[in-house]
Structure formats: structure tokens, C-alpha cells
Amino acid sequence: MSEHRRKPQPPQGGGRAAARKAAQQRPGRGAGSGRDVPTSSPSGPYEDQPGHAGRADARRAAGRGGSGRGKDAGRAGRGTGRPDKRLINYPRSDKDGWKRFVPSWKLVGGTALGFFAVVTAGAGIGIAMVSTPDANKMAEAQNNVFYWADDTQMVATGGSMNRQIVPIGKIPRSMQNAVIAAENESFESDKGVDPMGIGRAVWNMAKGESTQGGSTITQQYVKNTYLDSDQTLKRKVTELFISIRLGVSEEKNTILAGYLNTAYYGRDAYGIQAAARAYFGKDSTDLTPSEGAFLAAVLKGPNLYNPDGGIGAAATPEQNTARVKERWAWVLDREVKVGRMQQSERDQYKDFPTLVESAQARGMAGQIGYLVDTAKLYVTKSKGITAEDLAKGGYQIRTTFEKPKVDALVKAVEDTRDGFIDEKKRPEYDTFVQFGAASVDVKTGALVALYGGPGMDKKYFNNNANTTGVPVGSTWKPYVLAAAMQYGTQNSKGQGISADSKYMANDLTVINNRQGKPLFESPGKPFKQKNESTTPYGFVTLNEAMEKSINVPFAQLIFDVGHSKVRDVAKSTGILTESMDPGDNASFALGTSTPSAIRMADSYATFAASGTHREPFSVRSVQKDGKDLPGFEAPKAERAMDNSIADNITKVLRNVVENGTGTKAKKLGRPAAGKTGTTDKNKSAWFVGYTPELSTSVALFRSDPNAEKKELISMNHVGGVDSIHGGDIPALIWTEYMKAALNGVPEKDFPEPEEIGVTADASGAPSPSPSPSPSPSPSPSPSMSPPAEPSPSPSPSKGGKPSCRPWEICDPDASPSGSVSPSPSKSTGRPGGMTNGGGTGGFPIGGSTGG
């Protein structure tokens, strides 16, 4: 058979090359099989081919026709130009390579049209299913009920204002203009939502700028109708649907009236009528344009714009007043800018409107207002419930406050104040004297009592128990000593030191840095630390330095230990970092930091609990709609320091009460430890002390609560005495309160401390060093020096000096110096634990001259 007879007829229009390739393909055999027999591809090379294809097309077609190639064989049935019976031709069968995955314009258009149809149908169904809000129904806010520790009711507050719904005709046009200008300029023309406004808010947020207002007045009105705080997609979509429905079905006046009648303005006022009565004592119809601008400004956020103050460190009355004044002026200017007020009318309103006294404050008389604010702060700061959530009401909040202890603390403050302060007799000195105090259960960290001030009903809105900006003075020194016991000094070769280590204590001693070089307060002028007394003490033990509250030893000790170590110890006991003086100077050791009274009481409770710290808390449980909300369990205990360190600090602080600057606290008549604190220029005085059961701090300072710029004023000559110390009025208040609070509680002693540390005297101290631990003496020796603030109770001889009034300071140099060890303890210590930093949270808060 000739070669010509064995060749197949070439495909029509395919070209010779294509025909040759098609003839060479045979399933199951390689190219070198030795046979040149034409075969047909199962993919259908016999199918109709294009009548006039070029050679290249023919070659590609023939190449796809061969069998035995998995991928090519599978694609052959989807050859170019073949019809596809799939509903959606994707990947595209009429394209090759990457082009198969490029959707056609028909597919894109159809998909978009289908998506739009689904969204439109869904939105239509959603809008049809939602109901429009009822302002009268949504105005029914509930009270928040607060309970004492024994579950008796303390107070019901929140949502209790009379909320009368008023028609748009009783809302002045000036008030409407102010709100529209400030909140939603396009309100009268938009359809309930403002896509451009939402886009603007998102864009500004992406740039890190203020989000401004993405919501329209319609959307805000819808949000106001929901009394829960669910941040769910369902709720947000529902709000959007309702807004759209209102935007196309309701008159703008109806929506605006609904918004103004349901919005929260602060002072327990929901709705414009209640707000007009709460802030100005008048009906809404009588509001002036200036008053309307104020209420529009408050709508920005009552917690931060109500001049009375709000919840949180950033919501003080001073900060809120400054914010609302600025926004009030901005609202008036904004009305002019958007054409809702003439400039000539704007020029008439130069003075901020006058507000009436808060009825809310009148209902929170005495300490109740401070207790409620403290509990609210704990709830909002710790558990994510917002101030606005609480304002809407419906919560049952069970606190840790014990009414008998609160009453006892109030009585102790008022008794002492009434016998000490006489504003009529000494107006230039005795005005603006402030008291703050807090008491914490040692075993749990529960805040059982506080004294925040004379009362919100007396227009004093600052909570002095949780205030910032009042330096704690020498009550800071125990942290310096505890750090030295834990970390040691540069003289102890890494070992903790004992309180028997000796340091120079003379007045105006030059302080050296960690390199042993003098500190300089100015070029060529070494820094010399001043004591309160000029007594030439020489070298004294740290125990004696704490007893007499001598500054020089601790100013040097903090450099020997390191400022960061002291900060670590203070933080582990619950002192917040933001309240600490950031400076690495000598005065840091002497109490330039400003923790609150709550934090100081809780921190000292760590010493009382042998190094175990518990975060302070004021709320035991919270219920909403009859259900307990999770997350309000008592904070867990954490190991702040080894029990041997804490117990040795207690031993030193017991000596302060027994023989030092805190002897007025001896009248408690049971084991107690504590420390006095007084700051430069006599601007504040503290006493912080504890028993095994209770830790209490008392602060005394002078500040004008009505001054725009809050500054401490010297207390020199207050009460008719030259100066006030922590061992005077604060110690007297502490003692009277603790007597009442612990009445009937069995007496308990502190654990006996283990001997710790090495004796590491400061450079220049005489040798040999004292023995590691002096033996405790059951009673003071006859040669002991008297405390700087002697007690009127029986005490060692004062050399014939007349006894002092309870708040007077006697001459600390009236007798020879000396020291005694504290009374021996009765119980034994326990194994230590690892040091661990305490957390922050709960209560966000806040140079010394000596004790």
C-alpha cells in the first residue's frame, strides 16, 4: 500500500500542518509506536469545523482533539465557539486561559441587578414589618435602685423626672433651629438617613479625626426609643429601617418633636419640657434662644456637658462647664452660619445662661450622692455599661457600703470639724477647708464607707474620697521602705535591707544620686533636703526615721533603691500609675504623688493583709430586668509582696502609732498601724492607718470648690493653730471613726513579722553596724523622745510642758531623742509568696515636709 493511500483526508480549511498533527494522535500509544494509522479523537474531530479557518486555528483545534492528555481532553468539549448549556457561563467556555475567568458584562450586570432587587425587596419587607416609635410610650423610663450592703434600699434615682410630652407648637422655633443647626443641618430635606453624612463620618474616622455626626435627627430619635443597650446588627438594621420609614411617611415636625421629647439632657431629665424645668425652672415654651442653645449643646452628651459633672475622671464639673460653654457659643455661631439666626441677634447673647439649682442634687443629700456616683463609676469603668445606659434606668445595684459605718464616718468628720473650724470667727483662714475619707475591708477589698464632702445638696459636687490633686505627703514613705526590703540597695549587694539600717537624718543634708555624686538644684549648688525639724539627729535607723517622719533618710534611700522599684511596689498595692509623680527626684519619696483616699486605704490594706492585695470595689451585683448581669464578682486576691515584707512594714507603722507622729491613734485601744503625712506649705494633711480588719484613710486640704482653677491653699492658721499635721485632725477623725466601726468586733493582733534583710547602712554611717534586729520591748523606755504631735492621753513626761489641744502641735524637741521598738506581736507569720504587680481598674483617680 502506498504512502498516499494511508493518509487521511485533511480537514476542510485546516491546512496541511493541522492535518498531520491530527493524524499523529492515537490513544494509548506514543509517537514512536511504529504505526502511522489515522485515528479519531473521542472529543469529536469529526464534528463540523469552521469552513474557512486559518492554519494556526487548525493546529490548535487538532491539538485539542487528541486523547490521552487529561487536561486537554477535558477541555476539548468546551472548545472555542461551542454552545454552553450551563445556567451561568462561568468560568467562560468560549474563552481560553485567564480570559475564562473574566466575567462578561452580561454576568456583571445581571449580578448587580439581582443584588439590587434582593436588597430592595429585603428593605421593603423590613420597612413594612417595623413599627414607628411612640414617644409617649418610650418616655416611660425606670428608676435605678441602689441598695446598702445589707440589701436595704439606699435610694432610687434616674428616670424619675416628670416627662411631659409637648407638641411642636410649645417648642420655640429658636430651640428647633439650635438643634437642627448643631445636629443635622439637612434635616428638613433628607429622607431619614444621610448617606453623605455617614460617609463623611467614616472618612473622618479613617483619617483619625472626629467622627462628627453620622446620624440624622431621625436616626437619633429612633435610637432614643430603645431602652436597651444592645449593640447588635439586628438592632442597627432595625433602627435604619425605621428611620427610612419615618423619613418618607412622617412630617418633619412630628419627627423633630419626637426627638426633643425623648432625648436625655442630664439631671434626670428626659424630653425638652423636663429639661427646661430641670435647668431653668421654666416651661419649654418660655426658653430663650440662649437657653435653647445650651440645651442643644448638652445633647452632645450629658455626661460630659452637664455643668454639674458626670461619671469618670474626664467629667468633673470644671471640665464639663468649660466644654458646655464652648459648645454653647459654637451652637449660636453655627445657627448664624447655616442661616437660622441673624448675626445681630447672635450678638445679643454674650453671657452664658444662668442655671437653677439641680433638683437631682437636692434628692442626693449628704453622702448619698457620693456613694451613688462611686458605685456608678465602678459599674461604668469596670463592666462596660455606659453612663447613658444608667441614665435610662432599670438597674438594681447592690453596693458594698455599710450604712452604720458611713454614718460613723460622717459623725467623726462633722464632730471634729465643728470643734475646729469657725468660718465666722476666722473667715480668711477657715473657709474652704475640705475633708475626704475612705474605709476598706482588709479581707475583701470592699469599700464599706466614704466621706466625699458636705453633700451635693449643698452644691459641693466633687467627691473628696476619690479626688485627685491632693499630695499624700509622708504616707508615701512606707512604699520606699518596702522597696528597700524587697529589692535591697546599692549598699546591700542585692539583698533586701532591714529597718535597722542607718541613714543620715540631719536637716539640710546633701542628697547623692545612685553614682554617689551630689544632686544639684542649680549649677554649682548641691541640693540639700530639708526636714520639718532642725534637730541634729545624726545617723538614725529607718525605723526611727519613719517614727519621727524625718525626710532626709528617705530622700537618700529612694536613690539607693531606685525610683522604678518604688513605683513597682506602690503599683502592686493598688496605687494607679497615673496618680504617681513621674519625676525621679528626691521629693518623690516624700509624697508628691496624688492617689485618692480610696486608693490609699486600699493600698495600706495590702500591708494589713500580709502582702495580699485586692482591688477596691463598691458593687456586689447588678440586675437588669430581674436578671443578674455577669462580671460583678469580688476581685480576686493577688500576691503583691512577700508576707514577711508586709508584716515588717506593719511593725514599723505600729511604732509610728505607739511612739511617733501618730500617737493620737493610740486612743483606739487596739492594735493599729499607720502613717501621718503633711505637705509643703501645709496644703494637705493625711492619716492612713489600719487594724487587721479595716483600713481607713483621712485627707484634709483647703481648696475653693467654686474657683475656675483648682489650687490647694495653705492651711497655716486654720483652726487658730500655726500649722496642721497628719497626726492632728486627720488622726483624730480616723480614731473616732474606727472606734465606732469596730465596736463589738473582737480584738485581733497582727502577725508577728519574720526577721528579714541585712543591715546596710548608708555611706558614711559609723561602724560597727547595729545587729540585724533589736529585741522587742514590751513597753517604751523612760528615755524615749516624745512624738512630734503628743497625745493628750497619758504619755511619757514632756518635761513639764503644758498639754496641747487635740489639734495643736507641741515642740518636738522638748525632750531627749530616742526610740523604742513596737510592742511584740502575738501570732506567727506565714510562708511568703511571689511578688506580683496589682492590676488597675475599679476607681480611676488620682513635696512633703514630713509627718
Image: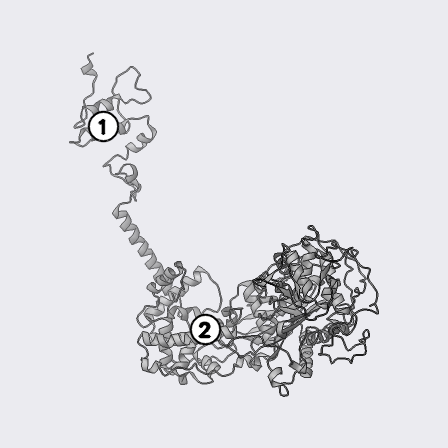
Q: Residue placed at 27% from the left, 51% from the top?
A: 109
| Residue 756 at least partly seen | yes
In this view, the residue farthest toward the left is 52
- Residue bearing the label numbered 2: 323
Callout 2: helix, strand or loop? Answer: helix
Callout 1: helix, strand or loop? Answer: helix
In this view, the residue farthest toward the front is 524
Counting from the top left corner in percent of width and height, residue 682 is at 63, 74
- Circle 1 crowding by C-alpha within 10 Å: few under 14, some 14–19, many from 20: many
Q: Residue placed at 55% from the left, 79% from the top?
A: 361
Q: In the image, which is nearer the foreground, mark 1 or mark 2?
A: 2
Counting from the top left corner in percent of width and height, residue 736 is at 72, 76
- Circle 2 crowding by C-alpha within 10 Å: few under 14, some 14–19, many from 20: some
Task: Return the residue nearer the eye: 133 or 275.
Answer: 275
Residue 755, by quadrant, is bottom right
Q: Residue placed at 23% from the left, 37% from the top?
A: 81
Residue 19, by quadrant, is top left
Give the amino acid type for the residue marked by disc 1 in the picture: Arg
Give the amino acid type for the residue marked by disc 2 in the picture: Arg
Label 1 vs 2, first from the N-terminus? 1
How many numbered dots are placed on residues in this image?
2
Task: Return the residue nearer the eye: 717 or 751.
Answer: 717
Task: Return the residue nearer the eye: 237 or 730.
Answer: 730
Q: Gap in Å between the C-alphas at discs 1 and 2?
A: 81 Å
Quadrant in which the N terminus appears = top left
In this view, the residue farthest toward the bottom is 424
- Residue bearing the label numbered 1: 59
